[in-house]
Image (tube, grey):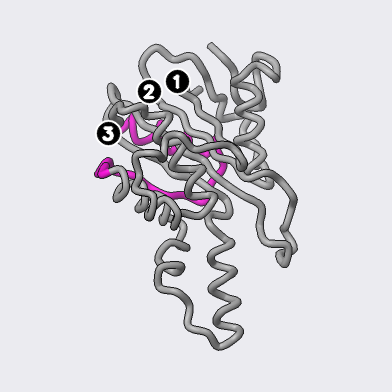
Amino acid sequence: MIQLNVTQLKFSCVGEVYPALEHIPAMQRRRLSTIAKLALNSAIECLAQQKVDYIVWASQYGDEHKTYKILEDVLHDLTPSPTQFSTSVHNAVAGLYSILCKDATPSTSLCADWTEAMIEAYAYLKTMHPQGRAMVVYYDEALPEVYEEHQIFQGFSMAALIGLEMPNIALDENKLKQVEPKYLDAMHFNEFWTQTLPQSYGAWSKC
């Protein structure tokens, strides 16, 4: 049984305003993709000028719309934009956050669901910083329609602070099940956390 303290859970959806991005210069802000804006907004709101010891960035698809645009350019014998390429990789959002927020906190970027990202944060804290805190950020948006896996859902991001002291939530590893598509795990956890769902959800339960 893994026990965690979860606080400051922030959920952002496409179409909302992004107040946490106001301190980023307008020119840089305009260059951010929708999914990057979502992820950064949730992360900055979650931290609220606090410090953490580790950040886990997680997404199933990442910024796939940029990757698809690059593939289209190649298909039409066009030279892909270097800027598009540099911000299409899976750890691009982590890099953008570090640069724009001037935050050198160690981080990792995973193709993972929310629960897997939480386990990564737990493992880091347990082995490296038992009295510290981590932040987990999950973000995703629907794939372009050309993909067989395309499913319509509203782009979103979710972030939370994670610690080991004074746990308020528990994860039973024996009840873990693979969730596909991965974004559903984050949506269901948010519903569970905000008490739309019962006292437990899948392998999660409240202490």
Query: What is the CA distance from the residue labelled 3 to the residue labelled 1?
Result: 20 Å
Q: Position of residue 106 (x, y in %)?
A: 28, 43
Q: Amino acid at mark 3?
A: Met
Residue plotted at (69% across, 19% down)? 196
The magenta stretch is 102-127
Q: Is residue 87 above or below residue 82?
A: above
Q: Residues within 10 Å of mark 1 (few under 14, many from 20)?
A: some
Task: Report the residue marked by disc 3.
Answer: 128
Q: Amino acid at mark 1?
A: Thr
Query: What is the CA distance from the residue labelled 3 to the residue labelled 2?
Result: 12 Å
Left or right position of 3 against 174: left
Q: Earlier in the sequence, mark 1 or mark 2?
A: 1
Q: Position of residue 94 (x, y in %)?
A: 38, 49
Task: Report the residue marked by disc 1.
Answer: 7
Q: Secondary structure at mark 3?
A: helix
Q: Secondary structure at mark 2?
A: strand
Q: Earlier in the sequence, mark 3 or mark 2?
A: 3
